[in-house]
Image (spheres, helix red, strand yellow):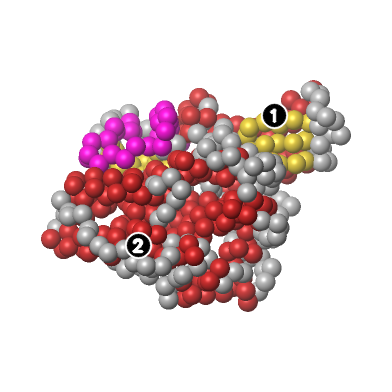
């Protein structure tokens, strides 16, 4: 049985503040991977997380991080569940998350495509604005960066390389 | 916790600090997911489908990882490793699902590390040895296109777990296909040497196309993408004779055993080890 105890809001707040291991300027709430936190009738905190990518090695860290923070906050029984459906979308990154990414020199994603990204063989692809100087004179150097969720770009105006969170 | 202390954050003690990113015995990637098999779904068939798709992904991930330190540029190593990591993640989820539904209760490690080559059901194209960069691209183009088309249909599978794994995989595979297609065009439309290599690579890959069966033939989409890519690259469509036999029936080339020996060696020498 699940009841809406006031405790659930506190537990949710604690879980929301856990930083993402790969993008530590974002909390798990900013990233949109924390789907839901509830406190069951017997006092167990159940937090549900969605992986960003199937192979994201940070998932184990996220689970451990949320569980550790909740235990530190006095919740003796914590359960972390995985939610696969619906799959994570970069659209779930919050406005504050997008602002923080840009402040740290990482270009936030645009709107995710409605289906899988279509195969495009023409060389023209929309440019990602540089998160440092705002120029659209940018180019992709690699579709994949230090993590699956990012691409590598560089700005031809300010000459700085930058990362870009891909739409998915 | 400050943004500046990301490594301290990672190093902070938590209940599972005996292991960080490697080894065996990780927490089940399907932990907390409803494991019931819906009525009307044939459990044995579902498990076999999951294993075949997981084997394709695991074996491909191993071949992609071999490019690390060997690719023409650092960016391509990073890309190929990332693609391999996505596939490894898909394999983990699919093996876990197979173990839940085939009645054996095996975990992902049992499938990945403790089955022999004859029990693997990956297509032979996935296990062929490295070759040059053009071959890696040709293989990735075919396998990612087929898997993407197949997963798009599996997203409507009556088993909600397989459907969810497929729906997630579709997003990843579209990026893999785009990467491979761009390189195929660049190489085909590049120098005489890169053109020659890309053409040879497509000819090497083509005889294995026949193995990529599925109930709703995703091979039509492979043919369509190959046509578009070769057209854009100024390459001829490969002419080929399909090879008999199928990895889906456990018939493999001589290359799978050495691949698995390397992949499984540590886990078999030190069962249950974590590091």
Mark 1 residue element: helix
Q: Residue at x 52, y 58 (%)?
A: B52
Q: Judge the density around disc 1: few (<14), some (14-19), many (≥20) Cα neighbours within 10 Å.
A: some
In the image, residue A53 lies at what x, y percent? 51, 44
The image shows residue B90, relative to residue B25, as above or below, that is above
Queried whether the magenta region covers residue B233, the answer comes back as no
Q: Tell which of B150 and A115 is nearer to you.
A: B150
Residue B21 figure quarter: bottom right
Q: Judge the density around disc 2: few (<14), some (14-19), many (≥20) Cα neighbours within 10 Å.
A: many
Question: What quarter of the picture does the C terminus of chain B occupy?
Answer: bottom right
Q: Tell which of A48 and B222 is nearer to you.
A: B222
Magenta range is A104-130
- Determine the chain carrying the residue at label 2: B
In the image, residue A147 lies at what x, y percent? 46, 48
The image's mark for residue B208 is 2
Residue A110 figure quarter: top left
Q: Residue at x 48, y 57 (%)?
A: B57
Mark 2 residue element: helix
In the image, residue B19 lies at what x, y percent? 66, 59
* Total count of labels: 2
Is residue A59 at least partly visible in the picture? yes
Q: Residue at x 53, y 27 (%)?
A: A94
Instruction: Give the distance between the C-alpha atoms of the residues marked 2 and 1, in whole angstroms.
Output: 53 Å
**Residue annotated with mark 1:** A13
In this view, the residue farthest toward the left is B192
Q: Is residue B77 left or right of residue A11?
A: left
**Please, what is the dominant secondary structure of the magenta stretch?**
loop
Both labels 2 and 1 in a single chain: no
Q: Residue at x 47, y 76 (%)?
A: B258
In this view, the residue farthest toward the right is A42
């Amino acid at each position: 049985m699940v009841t809406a105890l006031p405790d659930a809001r506190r537990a949710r707040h604690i879980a929301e503040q856990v930083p993402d291991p790969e993008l530590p300027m974002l909390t798990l709430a900013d990233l949109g991977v924390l789907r839901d936190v509830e406190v069951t009738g017997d006092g167990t905190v159940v937090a549900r997380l969605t992986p960003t990518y199937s192979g994201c090695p940070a998932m184990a860290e996220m689970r451990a991080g949320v569980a550790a923070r909740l235990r530190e906050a006095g919740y003796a029984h914590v359960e972390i569940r995985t939610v696969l459906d619906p799959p994570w979308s970069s659209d779930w990154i919050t406005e504050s998350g997008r602002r923080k990414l840009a402040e740290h020199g990482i270009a936030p994603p645009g709107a995710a495509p409605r289906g899988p990204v279509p195969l495009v063989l023409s060389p023209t692809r929309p440019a990602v604005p540089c998160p440092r100087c705002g120029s659209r004179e940018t180019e992709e150097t690699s579709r994949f960066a230090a993590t699956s969720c990012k691409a590598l770009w560089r700005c031809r105006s300010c000459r700085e390389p930058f990362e870009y969170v891909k739409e998915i | 916790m400050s943004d500046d202390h990301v490594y301290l954050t990672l190093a902070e003690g938590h209940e599972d600090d005996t292991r960080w990113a490697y080894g065996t015995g990780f927490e089940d990637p399907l932990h907390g997911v409803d494991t019931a098999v819906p009525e009307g779904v044939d459990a044995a068939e579902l498990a076999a489908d999951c294993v075949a798709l997981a084997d394709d992904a695991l074996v491909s991930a191993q071949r992609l990882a071999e490019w690390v330190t060997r690719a023409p540029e650092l960016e391509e190593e990073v890309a190929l490793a990332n693609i391999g990591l996505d596939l490894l993640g898909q394999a983990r989820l699919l093996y876990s699902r197979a173990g839940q539904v085939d009645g054996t209760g095996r975990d992902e490690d049992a499938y990945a590390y403790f089955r022999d080559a004859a029990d693997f059901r990956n297509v032979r194209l996935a296990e062929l040895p490295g070759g040059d960069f053009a071959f890696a691209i040709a293989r990735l183009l075919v396998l990612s296109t087929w898997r993407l088309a197949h997963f798009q249909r599996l997203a409507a599978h009556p088993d909600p777990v397989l459907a969810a794994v497929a729906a997630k995989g579709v997003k990843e595979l579209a990026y893999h296909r785009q990467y491979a297609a761009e390189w195929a065009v660049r190489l085909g439309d590049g120098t005489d040497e890169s053109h020659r290599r890309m053409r040879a690579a497509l000819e090497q890959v083509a005889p294995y196309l026949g193995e990529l069966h599925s109930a709703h033939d995703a091979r039509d989409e492979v043919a369509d993408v190959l046509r578009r890519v070769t057209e854009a690259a100024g390459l001829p469509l490969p002419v080929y004779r399909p090879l008999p036999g199928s990895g889906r029936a456990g018939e493999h080339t001589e290359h799978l055993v050495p691949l698995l020996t390397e992949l499984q060696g540590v886990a078999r020498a030190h069962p249950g080890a974590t590091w």
